[in-house]
Image (cartoon, grey):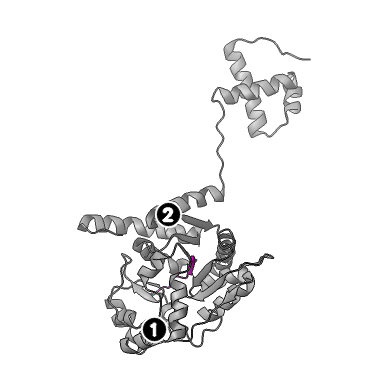
């Protein structure tokens, strides 16, 4: 029996409400609703449409990607970034999260790289995770060059090794730098920077189209900075007193993203921070709780154009940035 007849407004509204509940909450098909209410399928369809049009239905989508999108917007605002990718935390562990972020960074790079590009990079776990995850059947006519000197004893994450691996996977050409990351003193640094091979590699890095960097922690027990500069471990008081809280291109930075007053910054065989800023597109690969403070510092320094990270790290950066911004506001300082 089909009771598809004109009904008083109140009765019609109740009938529409009943149909909406059965359709949206109970998950019934329109044919099942028609059978249960003795209405035609066409009438049920019309009631559902009428209910939506009258504002009786509100649809809320809950998705990790919606949350990630908001995190991306917030991070971009903090660091004046052009592009941000926030990968979901789906593994339950920071090592697994790093692999997920590495895969996201690899996809991000493939979406930007083109024939003729020069790519400069650092070493480190984040950049290495990206290179490990990268897979493409296309060959790119690119050149990959180190952005800084090399470190003995850290082959897997050393910049020369990572540059070679990335070039091999992209089908391009890698260049090596044959100079230590830290010279013994400023005079030796000047001499190393003037060596023809070192000068040529760093000049290529200065003229790169894309820069990919890792971010180093200072205070954590697993601090990557002390892997780069072991002698600084014995001068931890000097590191602490300099106000350093992050490392970028082996330069120590303070909470505002400005170079810390640490003498080892003057011994670096590396691109300068200003040279990094001038590269058309640069992005960091960072994941894990020990990257929150370094990333927050680097974003305030406005050195980068992009970032690839995970949800937990992104949320930590945003949370850390809010109280610090208020502190600078009260003291009249500019956090950027």
Q: x%, y% of residue 151?
A: 47, 84
Q: The residue tagged with tag 1: helix, strand or loop?
A: helix
Q: Give the mark toward the camera: 2 or 1.
A: 1
Q: Nearer the viewer, residue 114 or 246?
A: 114
Residue at numbered disc 1: 193
Residue 226 in sight here: yes
Tell me which residue sits at (47%, 79%) in the image. Answer: 201
**Quick check: can you spot residue 222?**
no
Residue 70 location, x and y as percent? 47, 49
Q: Position of residue 276 (x, y in %)?
A: 40, 68
Inter-mark Cα distance, 2 to 1:
34 Å
User: How busy is the neighbourhood of tag 1: few (under 14 within 10 Å), some, or many (20 plus)?
Assistant: many
Is disc 2 surrounded by few (<14), some (14 to 19) or many (20+) residues within 10 Å? Answer: some
Mark linked to residue 76: 2
* Quadrant of the frame with the N terminus: top right
Q: Pointers 2 and 1 in contact (CB under 8 A)? A: no
Answer left or right for 310 relative to 137: left
Q: Which mark is residue 280?
A: none
Magenta stretch bounds = 209-217
Residue 42, placed above or below residue 229: above
At numbered mark 2, what does the secondary structure look like: helix, strand or loop? helix
Label total for image: 2
Quadrant in which residue 255 is drawn: bottom left
Judge left or right: residue 161 versus residue 44. left
Indicate the quadrant containing the C terminus: top left, top right, bottom left or bottom right. bottom left
Q: Position of residue 5 (x, y in %)?
A: 69, 10
**Residue at the image position 66 percent from the left and 24 percent from the top:** 19
Earlier residue among tags 2 and 1: 2
């Amino acid at each position: 029996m089909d009771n598809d007849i004109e009904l008083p407004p109140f009765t019609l509204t109740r009938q529409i409400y009943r149909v909406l509940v059965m359709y949206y909450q109970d998950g019934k098909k329109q044919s099942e609703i028609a059978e249960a209410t003795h209405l035609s399928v066409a009438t049920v369809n019309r009631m559902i449409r009428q209910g939506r049009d009258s504002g009786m239905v509100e649809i809320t989508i809950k998705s990790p990607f919606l949350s990630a999108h908001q995190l991306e917007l917030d991070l971009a605002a903090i660091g004046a970034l052009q592009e941000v990718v926030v990968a979901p935390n789906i593994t339950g562990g920071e090592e697994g999260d790093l692999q997920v972020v590495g895969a996201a960074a690899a996809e991000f790079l493939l979406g930007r790289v083109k024939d003729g590009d020069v790519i400069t990079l650092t070493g480190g776990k984040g950049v290495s995770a990206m290179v490990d995850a990268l897979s493409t059947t296309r060959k790119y006519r690119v050149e990959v060059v180190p952005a800084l000197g090399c470190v003995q004893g850290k082959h897997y994450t050393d910049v020369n090794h990572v540059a070679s691996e990335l070039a091999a996977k992209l089908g391009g050409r890698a260049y090596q730098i044959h100079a230590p990351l830290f010279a013994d003193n400023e005079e030796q640094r000047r001499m190393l920077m003037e060596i023809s091979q070192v000068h040529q590699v760093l000049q290529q890095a200065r003229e790169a189209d894309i820069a990919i960097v890792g971010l180093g922690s200072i205070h954590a027990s697993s601090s990557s900075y002390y892997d780069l500069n072991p002698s600084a471990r014995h001068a931890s008081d000097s590191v602490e007193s300099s106000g350093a809280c992050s490392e970028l291109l082996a330069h120590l930075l303070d909470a505002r993203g400005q170079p810390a007053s640490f003498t080892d910054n003057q011994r670096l065989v590396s691109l300068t921070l200003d040279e990094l800023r001038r590269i058309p597109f640069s992005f960091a690969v960072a994941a894990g709780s020990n990257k929150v403070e370094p990333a927050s510092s680097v974003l305030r320094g406005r050195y980068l154009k992009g970032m690839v990270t995970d949800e937990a790290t992104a949320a930590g950066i945003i949370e850390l940035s809010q109280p610090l911004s208020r502190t600078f506001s009260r003291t009249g300082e500019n956090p950027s």
